Structure formats: structure tokens, C-alpha cells
Image: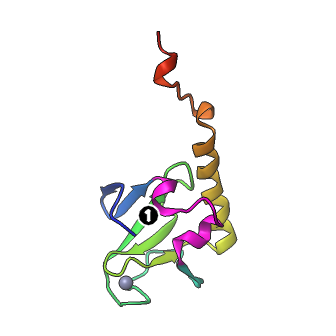
Amino acid sequence: MAEIGIIFKKSRLVMLDDVCDKNKRLVDSIEAEKDIICKNKPEICPKCFSTDIKGVEVMGSYEGTLFWECDDCDSAILRFEESRTEEYLQLAKGLWTNPQDWGYVPPSEFN
Ligand SMILES: [Zn+2]
């Protein structure tokens, strides 16, 4: 995963586009181990044992950390079970596909 988004404190705020491929199930594009769920921030990365773990927030999705990410090997660790994570990601997808819903006015409509 590339380093995109706003980095603040120990977490990263991203757009759905930065982390997900909309052509597949959103949670699958995170590429996390589906059987590892850490409600609280993991002490170490299950793959490379790094302690450099960050929370990732997705705009328009769950308010707060949606999943964790290792700063060293970029692997993701789920915070919620797979189906919940997918539901939260879908919220962000709705927001992205319906810009009218959040008051966006295209510049061409200004006079
Ligand atoms: Zn790692």
C-alpha cells in the first residue's frame, strides 16, 4: 500500500479509492489476514513482527480506525470482522458514488 492520505498522530486518513478496488469486494482489496482480528491496536505485526503499527481511517466509513496497517511490511490487520469491515467500506462507497448527497456542487454550476 502506498503512502497516501493525511498522516496524523498514529493513524492515516485515506479515501476509499486509496485502499480499495471498487471492482471487487472492498474488504478483499485490503488484503488482510481474515482470521486475525484485533479490536485494539496490535503490539506487533503478525507477519514481520514490527511494532510500527498505525490505524487507518477511511473517509465516509467508520469514524475512527477501521483497520490497522504495518508501517514496515504494509500488511493490514482487521479491527472488525470481515463482514462488518465490508459494511463500513460500503458506506464510504455510497458517499463516493453519490456526490450530491453531501452537497457537492460542480464548478460548472456556479454563475
Ligand atoms: Zn509487518
- Report which residue position mark 1 lands on: 56
Q: Nearer the viewer, residue 39 or 21?
A: 21
- Count neighbours of disc 1 (C-alpha within 10 A) and say few if under 14, some if 14 to 19, many if 20 or more: many
Q: Quadrant of residue 55?
A: bottom left
Q: Position of residue 42 (x, y in %)?
A: 43, 80
Q: Position of residue 85 (x, y in %)?
A: 62, 66
User: Image check: 67 left or right of 11?
Assistant: right
In which quadrant of the rendered image does the N terminus lie? Answer: bottom left
Q: Position of residue 109 (x, y in %)?
A: 52, 17
**Ligand 1 appears in which quadrant?**
bottom left
* Ligand 1 neighbours mark 1 (CB distance < 8 Å): no
User: Image check: 67 left or right of 90?
Assistant: left
Seen at 37% across and 62% down, the residue is 11
Q: Is residue 21 magenta?
A: yes
Seen at 45% across and 72% down, the residue is 68
Seen at 30% across and 60% down, the residue is 9
93, above or below 83, in the image: above
Q: Position of residue 81 (x, y in %)?
A: 64, 74
Q: Quadrant of residue 22?
A: bottom right
88, above or below 48, in the image: above
User: Image check: 96 left or right of 111?
Assistant: right
What amino acid is at disc 1? Val
Seen at 53% across and 78% down, the residue is 32
Q: Is residue 73 magenta?
A: no
Q: Residue furthest top?
A: 111
65, above or below 51, in the image: above
User: Image check: 67 left or right of 7?
Assistant: right
Point out the stretch of residues depicted in magenta. Answer: 15-31
Q: Nearer the viewer, residue 53 or 104?
A: 104
Q: Secondary structure at mark 1?
A: strand
Q: Nearer the viewer, residue 27 or 66?
A: 27
